[in-house]
Image (cartoon, helix red, strand yellow):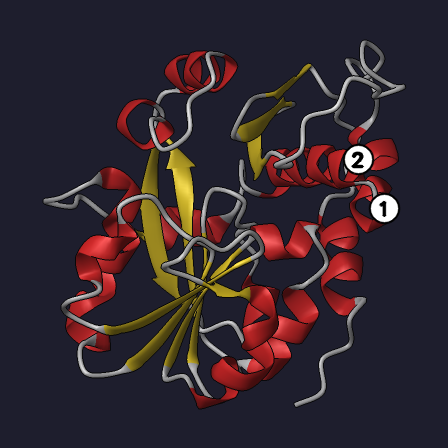
Amino acid sequence: MKVNPRKIYNLLLKSSQTNASVREIIIGLTWTYCQADGIGLCMSPGQPTRTLPWSGTLVNTAIANLAPWLQSWDSYQATVAMAAINAVINSSSPLLMSSQPLSPKGSANLAVFEHFLPLIRGKRVVVIGRYPGLSQYEQEIDLTVLERQPSNQDLPDTACEYLLPEADWVFLTATSIVNKTFPRLVELSQNAKLVLMGPTVPWLPDLADMGIDYLAGVCVTSPEALRQTIAEGGGVRIFDTGVQYHVLELSP
């Protein structure tokens, strides 16, 4: 199935039409946080910068004016836009209301993998993005991790062209929407069960039409603790203080 590369971006812009304005933006070390009528998250860019020209101007900006930044090739603009869009979509999504909360026995940030473990044993599994602690599952499943900045445990993201068409299961970070790799990665994963995951996930049913089989995003459980954890540089720590993973199988 050929994927229109602009479809996901048009969908997100359409789904975030609102009169709401930004109340607060925090660009933390790992997560970017947007408070509007609800709270939206997006993974922060990996490269720090001291030259953002719009810092100090975003509060009271209309979300409708920030959302088009998602199409920008500037990683900070796209990140802020995604967090703002999620603040609109995820605060009122009926999908999130009907999703299954995960209460893992192990690390909270690995709840999605623990949940799917019975289904992915014996399968060829590709994970886009190295999740901290993921190596504990490498003895139980046939696991390959693709990373933009690979360690010696990973393969570079260019391996996606060869591995994704042969995979049984693909776990795709929703940050791929922000860095614009989402359309191609989804297209390559059409033969696999495809899980879109992470705090950046927008809870939209239309993602089923793009080949997504499961959403594995988060529900905010403690807004104040989440804000503080992100402001204090928290990464996986947010899963212990402010958010909980939820999973939902999408209907085509």
Residue 183 appears left or right of 137: right
Q: Can you say whether 120 is above or below 48 in the image? A: below
Q: Residues within 10 Å of mark 2 (few under 14, many from 20)?
A: many
The numbered dot on residue 139 is none
Question: Sequence order check: which comes first, mark 2 or mark 1?
Answer: 1
Q: Which one is nearer the viewer's eye here, 11 or 141?
A: 141
Circle 2 sits on which residue?
Answer: 77
Find numbered disc 2 in the image and state the secondary structure of the residue it sits on: helix
Residue with the most extreme front position: 152
Question: Amino acid under label 1?
Answer: Ser
Name the residue located 53 percent from the left edge and 30 percent from the top edge.
Answer: 31
Image spot of residue 53 (x, y percent): 89, 19
Q: Is residue 38 visible?
A: no
Circle 1 sits on which residue?
Answer: 72
Question: Amino acid under label 2?
Answer: Gln
Image quarter of the N terminus: bottom right
Number of callouts: 2
- Contact check, label 2 and label 1, Cβ < 8 Å: yes
Image spot of residue 83 (x, y percent): 64, 35
